[in-house]
Image (cartoon, rainbow, N blue to C red):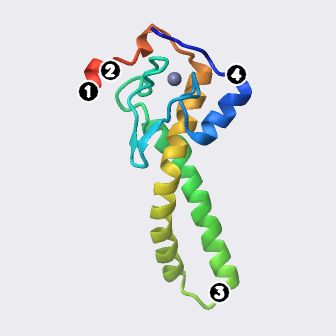
Amino acid sequence: MNKGQKCNQKLQWRGLWKMRCPYCCKTPLLSSWFSFQHGCPSCDFRYEREIGYFTGASWMVMFPIVALIGFAMAATLLILMPHLDALVVAAICSIAMVGVGILVMPFSMALWLYADHAIHPLNEDDTYDKELVN
Ligand SMILES: [Zn+2]
C-alpha cells in the first residue's frame, strides 16, 4: 500500500468540505455529481470498503437531513401561508426534497467516509486495486 503523506487534522476538515480523499486530502471523491471515485490513486485508499458500504450514508446521514429540511420547509410554508392545504404543502415539500436529496447525497457519502475513516483508519485490506475497477 502506497500510503503517501497523510494530511493533518485541520486539512481533513477542509478536505471533507471540498470532498477530497480522507487520507491524503488531495484526490477528489467525486468523478461527477452522481458518481463516487472507486479509490484514491495518490494513496491507494479504496473508498467503498465493502459491498453496500455507502448504504449507511443514505440511512444515517442523508435521510435525516432531508427529512429535517422537509419538515422545516413545511412548517415555514404553513406559517407563512396558512391558507394552503396540507396536501399541497406535502406535495411541494416532497418534490423539493428530491432536489435536496440530490444536492445532499455526495456530502452525506463524504461525511460517512470521513467518519468511518476516523473510527477505522486505513489497513492493508483497503488498498485500491486500479486493475479491478478499470
Ligand atoms: Zn488519498
Dot 1: element: loop
Q: Which residue is mark 3?
A: 81
Q: Amino acid at mark 1?
A: Asn
Q: Residues within 10 Å of mark 2 (few under 14, many from 20)?
A: few
Q: Which residue is mark 1?
A: 134
The quadrant in which the N terminus is found is top left
Dot 2: element: helix
Q: Residue at the spot x=56%, y=26% of the render?
A: 116
Could you give the CA–CA distance between mark 2 and mark 4, rounded to whole angstroms? 26 Å
Q: Which residue is mark 4?
A: 8
Residue 104 position in % (x across, y down): 53, 52
Residue 69 position in % (x across, y down): 61, 61
The quadrant holding residue 52 is: top left
Tell whether 18 sits left or right of 131: right
Above-or-below relation of 116 to 30: above
Farthest right residue in view: 10
Mark closest to the chain's N terminus, 4 or 1: 4
Please report contact status of discs 1 and 2: CB closer than 8 Å, yes or no.
Answer: yes
Tell whether 65 sits left or right of 88: right
Q: Amino acid at mark 3?
A: Met
Above-or-below relation of 64 to 74: above
The quadrant holding residue 134 is: top left
Dot 4: element: loop
Mark closest to the chain's N terminus, 3 or 1: 3
Tell whether 50 sits left or right of 114: left
Please report contact status of discs 3 and 4: CB closer than 8 Å, yes or no.
Answer: no
Comparing 73 with 42, the one in front is 42
Above-or-below relation of 75 to 80: above
Farthest bottom residue in view: 83
Q: Which residue is mark 2?
A: 130
Dot 3: element: loop
Q: Amino acid at mark 2?
A: Lys
